[in-house]
Amino acid sequence: MSWVDDSNAALLTDLYELTMAASYHGHGMSGRATFDLFVRELPPRRNFMIACGLEQALQYIENLTFESDSIDYLRSLSLFSEDFLTYLSELSFTGDVWAIPEGEVVFEREPFLRVTAPLIEAQLLEPFLINCITFQTMVASKAARVAIACRDRSFVDFSLRRDHAADAALKAARAAFVGGATGTSNVLAGKFYGLPVSGTMAHSYVMAFEDEEAAFRAYMQDFPEAAVLLIDTFDIEEGARRAARVANDLRDQGMRLRGVRIDSGDLAPRARSVRKILDEAGLEDTGIILSGDLDEYRIKDLLDDDVPVDSFGVGTQLGTSADAPTLGGVYKLVADDRGPKIKLSAGKATLPGRKQVYRVEAEGHYQRDVIALESEEVEGRSLLKRVMRDGRRLGPPPSLSEAQSLCRDSLTKLPPALRSLEGQEDYQVDYSAGLEAMIEEMKAQSR
């Protein structure tokens, strides 16, 4: 079975990127070009996005290379000249990258990554950057909405088995953490990214023992400091009573029942019944974890109903962002050595020139953003930061905990209406005077 790694990732591209690159090469088009990556339009009921995926994008850019196996495959297509294949075999990225940091709130039309490099180098990055950044931004944005719904409760990413293949599962766990998850069930993501890993047990574990109580006893004895028991395999209330009996039997041996998980049924009344059973057994410190196709809407409803719950496991709806499973991310040419570029296609127009995004804050909240030309001086905090110069990163990346903290801080500064899970609220994103003038001038030139 084949996997994507640094040795073959250069071929994780669309064929037309390579045919365009071959044509550029043949016509001696080697000048520097600038591309912006942005999302044209937010999905329904989305008020913001959380920028995510930059670290993997930079790793790809820094290690971009066409190894001999890749060159041999391209040769077998009988599309490319030997001169072009030799060029690819010697290719490495030599350009500059600016980006909005992971965890920052972003809005539609705002460039959250900008690449300036020789035309072929910049062009070839398009598919991977869109794939990597828009997917993780989509999941981080969903996770941020779940975090808003959870209020002071925590949630864990349970999405591995529902995510769209292995690479997606790893990136989803990472993005969910940036968006506010406290951990993941995905052990490989824990190893790769240093994420806290968390898990309970499956119904098959309970059914594999002679009876439910025997399963609970064995699990607590095997994991005396971190046992969470799944109590809904048969009857939830009876499962809670059996868990309580086992916990009290083993308490003198220093074993603690950290929590019980309910994964099915009408969660609100079940959680209340279980809380009462645990409290009456003296297990007030045993938490209740709810899971089972949860999303931000169901979590909000549960907490609005004062359901006794300590944390949530969120899977399918998180890792696939099921209600908004795509972002319309694009990567467009905005400038080259001859000047700014604009696309005027209906519904797909672009903003010309090298740009910066500025954020204006007042009274502890974001007020508006301004997209401006790089050369302009505009009020506000600049969001795009240079992260790569001449093909090399300018420093170590922020930790995922720092990205999560930035996300949490950004969410608190959103205007209250934008933190709503219902409906869609517009955030003010303006164009600077210089950008407006450039757009009008280039429209006039195109007539």
Image (cartoon, grey):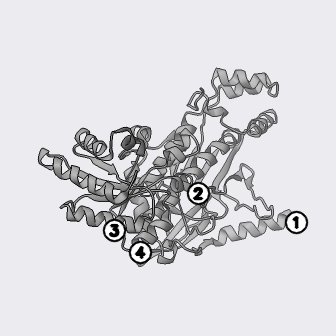
Please name the residue shown 58% across and 65% down the image.
107
Would residue 139 be found to the left or right of residue 313 on screen?
A: right
Amino acid at the residue labelled 4: Asp
Residue indicated by mark 2:
322
Nearer to the camera, 220 or 117: 220
Residue indicated by mark 1:
447
Mark sitting on residue 304: 4
Amino acid at the residue labelled 3: Arg
Callout in the foreground (1, 3): 3
Label 4 residue SS: helix
* Vertical relation: 288 (above or below) 66: below
Q: Disc 4 and disc 1: Cα gap in Å?
A: 56 Å
Please name the residue shown 32% across and 50% down the image.
229
Extreme residue toward the right, this view? 447
Mark sitting on residue 272: 3
Label 2 residue SS: loop
* Vertical relation: 376 (above or below) 216: below
x then y, percent, for residue 410: 44, 65
Callout in the foreground (2, 3): 3
Q: Earlier in the sequence, mark 4 or mark 2?
A: 4
Q: Disc 1 and disc 3: Cα gap in Å?
A: 68 Å
Q: Are marks 4 and 2 in contact (CB under 8 Å)?
A: no
Label 3 residue SS: helix
x then y, percent, for residue 17: 74, 39
